[in-house]
Image: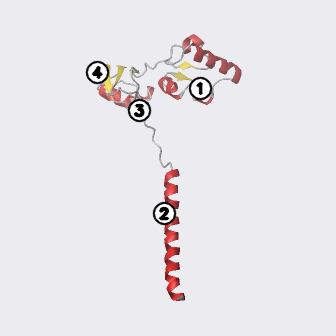
Amino acid sequence: MLLEQRPSALNFSLLLAITVAIAVLALRCEGSAGIEVELREPRPGIDEIRVDVAGAVVRPGVVVVSPGERVADAIERAGGFTAGADRAAINQSRRVIDQDHIVVPSIGERRGLIDINSADAGTLQTLRGIGPVRAADIVASRESDGPFGTTDDLLARELLPESVYEQISDLIGAR
């Protein structure tokens, strides 16, 4: 009788071990984020984005891109860079949004960046997404907390949302 009980106890132990192992694996999979990819969903009803591409591109004008595409894609749809384009002057990896205006300067024509450490509120308001309140907050932060070390400090000091920062990051500097 002892021999007959051992196999069923062994089977029960084996079954229990397998059940615990499956439960542990399932819990690990649920909590594991793995590689996270941010998918920016367009507003409902938007299936295309129109972007004005100007400057040193083959065919300047309004181009159509899909939601989630980047500045490089918009430039490609405008025929690509001309031979004299200053490719380093713009952030080609930035995602475009509807009604963006992308200007590709020619070499030597680089636009001056707006210095967030010296620009007055009026100058800051010329940037997309910066109104009177945000401009005043930037100036006040600069005066109370000291100059900005980099433009990323606008995010670190919670003065701008990331979406606005992405739109203007090619246009600003911190000297």
Looking at the picture, how far across and down is residue 109, in whole percent? 43, 18
Is residue 82 among the parts visible in the rendering? no
Circle 3 residues within 10 Å: few <14, some 14–19, many ≥20: few
Circle 1 residues within 10 Å: few <14, some 14–19, many ≥20: some
Looking at the picture, how far across and down is residue 113, in whole percent? 52, 20
Q: Is mark 2 on a helix, strand or loop?
A: helix
Residue bearing the label numbered 3: 41
Q: What is the number of the mark on residue 59?
A: 4
Q: Residue at x 66, y 18 (%)?
A: 140
Say whether marks 3 and 1 touch (CB < 8 Å): no
Q: Nearer the viewer, residue 23 or 58?
A: 23
Say whether marks 3 and 4 touch (CB < 8 Å): no
Circle 2 residues within 10 Å: few <14, some 14–19, many ≥20: few
Q: What is the number of the mark on residue 154?
A: 1
Q: What element carries label 1?
A: helix
Is residue 90 among the parts visible in the rendering? yes
The numbered mark, 2 or 3, whose residue comes first in the sequence reads 2
The numbered mark, 3 or 1, whose residue comes first in the sequence reads 3
Question: Alpha carbon of mark 2 to alpha carbon of mark 3: how far?
Answer: 35 Å
Residue 55 occupies quadrant: top left
